[in-house]
Image (cartoon, rainbow, N blue to C red):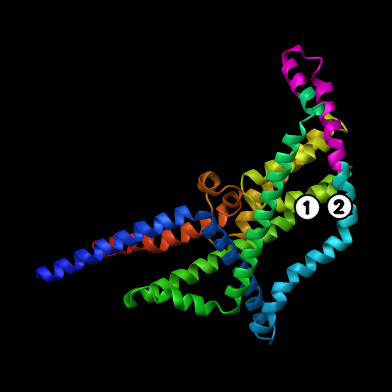
Amino acid sequence: MNLKLVAKRTLVQAVTTVAVVLLTWLIIENSKIFLVAFGGILIAIMFSGSARWLAKKTNITAKVWLPISMLAPVLLLGLLMAYAAPKISTQANELVDRMPEALEYVRGQFTEFSSIGKLDDNLDKITNYDPKMSTVMNAVSSLLSSTINGLGNFIFAIILAIFLSINPKWYVDGGLTLVPPPHKSKARDLLKNCETALAGWLLAKLASMVMVGIFTTVGLWALGIDLALILGIIAALLSFIPNLGPLLAFIPAGLVSILTGVDTLLYVSILYIGIQTVESYILTPILQAEIASLPPALVLLVQVLLASMVGMAGVLLAAPLTVLLIVITNQLYVKRLHNNQDHGNS
């Protein structure tokens, strides 16, 4: 073999390896920025996907529907808040006011058991906690900083989504210029498959969230829980987070329901478990039948990994990132492996 050709291939492999290592290091060091950018891409897929779907159903082009699809969520949210804000505000204040009473009720139920005296002491510390002003200020400052940071990231993701939605072809073609010509077709197919999978997952998740919110609100209302509306909204929003969301949503519902009695708490527990079971084993499989199935253990692993790296944002976006990981793995490795096996057998 020509030594010059060998040297050239070796140099290309070395440069490629260094580039991959540097890119990996860059992504790890700036993981929060890349995660926010991925959130913007996800929102852009929602905007452009909605516009294309509306264009197919009507004789109006997607360019006309695009600004409408961007403004519609804001308008719907505004109308919902204008209609429900007074009641939600009242229920939220009532929920906050009931928290100490709920803790006091729990302590009263367990004081007769000497074996859990430590629990009684701990609850007493919680209900009678009198923090120093410096501690309160530090907590408020930390919460305010996190809120501002999260709001800034969300605004950045929205702005990025708007730019990506206006002319997605420009960015796709620009990215494909970095791909060698023999592989451009496969790279374009990969991007298209990723977009299709993420759009399908997002549509299924939004539909599932709406159903969870409706089921929870109606169920709590049937049980006579006064805070059914806000608890239903909390359940719908937190159902976006796999595995952890339903547990987090149950905490305020459990504290409120225990005031009525242990029987009510039991019924609410059964309601939440039933809704979670229906959502996980019936709704989600049906809604996601056309896209990659998400193994719960894999999603949980990605959640833990991203939580340790970037915090809550990683937990929120773990599921769509898992969808992306599955699509890329299937197309770049699994299909190629099967094709090689088929060629080997033939």
- Distance (Cα) linking label 1 and label 2: 10 Å
Q: From the viewer's side, name the closer residue of 335 and 202.
A: 202
Residue at the front extreme of this rendering:
134
Pick the quarter of the image with the C terminus: bottom left
Please, what is the dominant secondary structure of the magenta stretch? helix
Q: Quadrant of residue 252?
A: top right
Residue position for label 2: 88
**Circle number at residue 233:** 1
Circles 1, 2 touching at the beta carbon (< 8 Å):
yes
Task: Tell me if 39 is positioned left or right of 137 in this view.
Answer: left
Other-residue count near label 1 (Cα within 10 Å), few / some / many at <14 / 14–19 / ≥20:
many
Element under disc 2? helix
Q: Which residue is pictured at 38% across the width and 73% down the height? A: 178
The residue under label 1 is which amino acid type? Answer: Ile
- In the foreground, 25 or 299: 25
* Label drawn at residue 291: none
Q: Is residue 19 visible?
A: yes
Label 2 crowd (10 A; few <14 / some 14-19 / many >=20): some
- Up/down of 345 relative to 136, above or below: below
Q: Residue at x 31, y 59 (%)?
A: 18
Which residues are drawn in magenta?
95-122
Q: Is residue 305 above or below residue 118?
A: below
For this orientation, the residue located farthest to the bottom is 59
* Whether residue 248 is situated above or below residue 325 in the rendered picture: above
* Amino acid tagged 2: Ile
Q: Is residue 343 magenta?
A: no
Q: Is residue 111 found inside the magenta-colored segment of the image?
A: yes
Work out whether residue 84 or residue 246 is closer to the camera in this orientation and state it. Answer: 84
- Counting from the top left corner in percent of width and height, residue 102 is at 83, 32
Mark with earlier residue (1, 2): 2
Residue 308 x, y percent position in the rendering: 53, 44
